[in-house]
Amino acid sequence: MLQPGLSENEMTAVTPALDAVASKEPAPLRASVRNLNFFYGDNQALKGVELPIVEGKVTALIGPSGCGKSTLLRCFNRMHDLYPGNRYQGEIILYPEGINIVAPEVDPMLARLRIGMVFQKPNPFPKSVYENVASGLHIRGIRNRSEVDGRVEAALRQAALWDEVKDRLQESAYGLSGGQQQRLCIARTLAPDPELILLDEPTSALDPIATAKIEELMDELRGAYTIVIVTHNMQQAARISDFTAFMHLGHMVEYDVASLIFTNPTEERTRSYITGRFG
Amino acid sequence: MKPLAAQPSRRLSDAEIVARAHRSDRNFAILGLSVLVISMIVLLSLIVDFMVDGLGRIDLDFLTSFPSRRASEAGILSAWVGTTLVMLVTTALAVPLGVAAGLYLEEYAPRNWITHLIEINVTNLAGVPSIIYGLLALGLFVQSLAMGQTILVAGITLALLILPIIIVATREAVRSIPLEIREGAYALGADKWQTVSGYILPTARPGILTGAIVGMSRAIGETAPIITIGALTFIAFLPPSPVQDTFPFINFNWLNSPFTVMPIQMFNWVSRPQAAFHVNAAATGLILLLMTLLMNAIAIWLRYKIRRSMR
Ligand SMILES: Nc1ncnc2c1ncn2[C@@H]1O[C@H](COP(=O)(O)OP(=O)(O)O)[C@@H](O)[C@H]1O
Ligand SMILES: [Mg+2]
């Protein structure tokens, strides 16, 4: 169920959906999207989107192709700023400070330093496995050898890749399989310890076994990290997400606890979509 | 009146379609092979001709002697040293400047009409005849700035000549880098300079190297602009040595030395009536060819090493 105006108390915005999960305490938010419009030039791709992102949970964005899932995800780390003519209107509040990260006066780098992203197609850099994972640390000026070594190993372990690559850290990342490359990209995102992780259909280029590994990984990261994942695979959304948001034609149609979205959606459009009548 | 029903054209059978496809594949392959063979034969006969005429003339004396009035005593010491030093200056100037300009145009320049104008001009400059560069250098460096007919001026002139080639190659190389690499770096929080220097430039290195070597191969054989600035055709001394035995142990006086280069030495000998000098010219041509091949070989080896480290 979607509540257009969240409550006054920003830190503890409550919806019935959240109550259902955190039955006693109100769920703390990591971020919250408020009345967000986004324009590719004159083409409005997001229309008054509202979405709370609950701390330590997995939030899935679903919806038919072209409904604006990627567009919304890429607002969080200001990826759209890389291209001319794009415009945000509205707010994405990042807690606990409560800054609006899509405000024009906020530098896009500020958002990207705190929010990590994993892309649809694995995109390792043409460097060694080690260099790939260390990239985010080097960018932040962390060069102390033992610290970097430690964090690279920890990130690779978290991404369930350490055992497979520990003997080939200095080899090129391009030698890894597609699934391994995607887990490498996840490790690369984890290494600088982001406050929020965005994943845009991270398994759509992978085979079922590699997909299962990534889903397992999502499960292990739950709690330690706050995750927003775009998927066009509803089974996947049902398996791995705590909350699910359904988008259609740039609108946020419905947001709720995952189990409720998939068993008892409020909106007719959601029902049609999850029963496979369109999209 | 009969309805104008289109007469159905005879349908080819599947076997005929396959046969037609094979036929056109074969025709094109034959055409391509003939063109290749013809151009290889021309090139090879040129080299063989050089070899027949000049190979016997090449010995250590030829490489370590100055030019002389007597063809049998003449050598190309001043010419190959001159070519090497001029190429050193050209490379040191053109590669960093060209790469920086290409990166700027591709990554930093605002997309407006001024940038567009610059881009069009850079591309056009690559097609300007080299003698125009020679005239520019003669007017600007030699006469207005009174820099003399030196190695430095020749190096700058050739650098200007090949700058457009390197700029265009850099831009192509940068543009062909997958969007995902660029976005991946920015998504990690990298600023523009970190992205460009740490991720874009290293990924573009093989393409840039190719452009640099195309440019340098052109520069090493250029004669017109160097004659235009007034390089001497008869040089019986070497530039001052860049190393010395007193502090600071290196000097750059050689930059201001008069010089000659291989193509000019060759040109000089070819235009003499005596056949013995023509033999010298052929030998010089062979060595110039060898120097170009060596330069290319180094570049190919470097590119191979870079590519291997990237996959
Ligand atoms: N770079 C772009 N420029 C203009 N329109 C775009 C661009 N990228 C996406 N769009 C449009 O925005 C809408 C949402 O696209 P997208 O967010 O990629 O959808 P999804 O990820 O849900 O498939 C689509 O109608 C698409 O055509
Ligand atoms: Mg998408």
Image: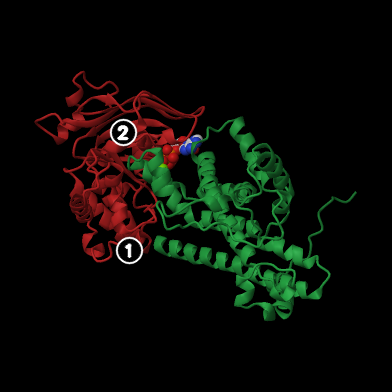
Depicted B103 relative to depicted A34: above or below:
below
* Chain drawn red in the picture: A
Left or right: B258 in relation to B39: left
Left or right: B26 in relation to A123: right
| Tag 1 subunit | A
| Tag 2 subunit | A
Judging depth in this view, the residue of A217 and B150 nearest the camera is: B150
- Report helix, strand or loop for mark 1: loop
- The quadrant the C terminus of chain B occupies is bottom left
| Residue situated furthest front in the rendering | B246
Q: Callout 2, which amino acid? A: Ala
Tell me whether marks 1 and 2 sit on the same chain: yes
Identify the residue under disc 1. A171
Q: For chain B, what colour was chosen?
A: green
Give the percent coordinates (x, y) of residue A51.
Answer: 29, 30
1 or 2: tag closer to the N-terminus: 2
Dividing the picture into quarters, in which one does residue A253 lie?
A: top left
Gap in angstroms between the C-alphas marked 1 and 2:
31 Å
Is residue A1 visible in the rendered image? The answer is no
Give the percent coordinates (x, y) of residue B143.
Answer: 69, 40
Scheme of colours in the image: by chain
Depicted B245 relative to depicted B200: above or below:
below
Dividing the picture into quarters, in which one does residue B40 lie?
A: bottom right
Q: Callout 1, which amino acid? A: Glu
> Marks 1 and 2: which is nearer the front?
1
Q: Write the residue at 15% across / 36% down.
A: A21
Q: Write the residue at 18% across / 20% down.
A: A9
Identify the residue under disc 2. A111
Is residue B200 visible in the rendered image? The answer is yes
Dividing the picture into quarters, in which one does residue B24 lie?
A: bottom right
Q: Write the residue at 55% across / 46% down.
A: B98
